[in-house]
Image (cartoon, grey):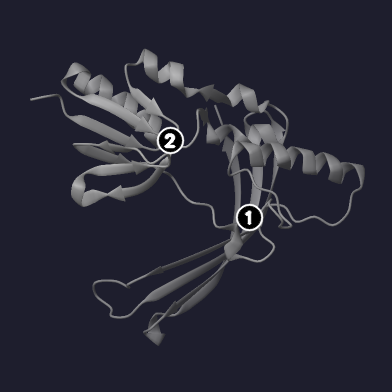
Amino acid sequence: MGKPLIVVLGAGLGGTIASYEIKAALKDRADVMTVSDSDTYSFIPSNPWVAVRWREPEAIQVHLPPVFAKKKIGFTSVGAKRLHAGEKRLELNDGSSINYDYLVISTGPELAFDEIEGLGPHGGHTVSICQTAHASAAADAFDAFAQNPGPIVVGANYKNGKDAGSVAVAGDRELQVYEIGVGYTVAPGLTLQAQYDYFKLDSDVAASDDKGNVVLVRTVLAF
């Protein structure tokens, strides 16, 4: 009987760490294979540094194939097309498949700028730091803005979530949160922030409806 194969789907912060930890824990008792849609790992928490030009994109990115090879972890950047869970099979974008014994899914979020008209860096009216390429584009956009200043909104956000309610109260609940804020970096690693939130909670049970305003002022230290 051969060794079990553990496939990790996703090579971002969660998927890369999962691959490392699983291989370190099991050593030669199992094979580990990581599937991604890119050869490059970007350290997403450092994207704000790229946006203000304190780091170049290359400084927060790692070329994955040689790193995984050194750890004796299999790797492909072909990307996954479809999961056939009943067959324990992962279909890849090139038509090939990987049959696995265990699967770890760590693909991260799918950005949905198209859900709000005008949102996002691709044809929208906002910038983003969700991806390193976005952060680099945001730096360029701010440089252009500095050359021709005008009205600007910093730190606007919208969140929407819906669940099936609580175990004690029947009905669905929907929460909408509107955020706007601004931050000022006093020194590298020290930022002062102010934020205003308006929230609205709608429920199938009218008595559970709620809305309110939240003002936050905070100091952020990053080491």
When asked about the image quadrant of residue 89, the answer is: top left
Percent across and percent down for residue 141 are 79, 44
Q: Amino acid at mark 1?
A: Gln
**Residue 205 in view:** yes
Judge whether 42 appears above or below 67 on screen: below
Q: Is residue 52 left or right of residue 202?
A: right
**Relative depth, front residue between 20 and 198:** 20
- Residue type at mark 2? Ser
Q: Residue at x 78, y 39 (%)?
A: 140
Q: Position of residue 15 (x, y in %)?
A: 38, 34
User: For mark 1, what is the residue?
Assistant: 195
Q: Is disc 1 surrounded by few (<14), some (14 to 19) or many (20+) residues within 10 Å?
A: some
The residue indicated by pointer 2 is 36
Q: Is residue 59 above or below residue 78?
A: above
C-alpha span from label 2 to label 1: 36 Å
Residue sitting farthest toward the left: 1
Which residue lies at the image location 52% right of the left edge and 28% below the top edge? 40
Q: Is residue 197 visible?
A: no
Name the residue: 31% across, 28% down.
Answer: 33
Quarter of the rendering occupied by the C terminus: top right
Q: Residues within 10 Å of mark 2 (few under 14, many from 20)?
A: many
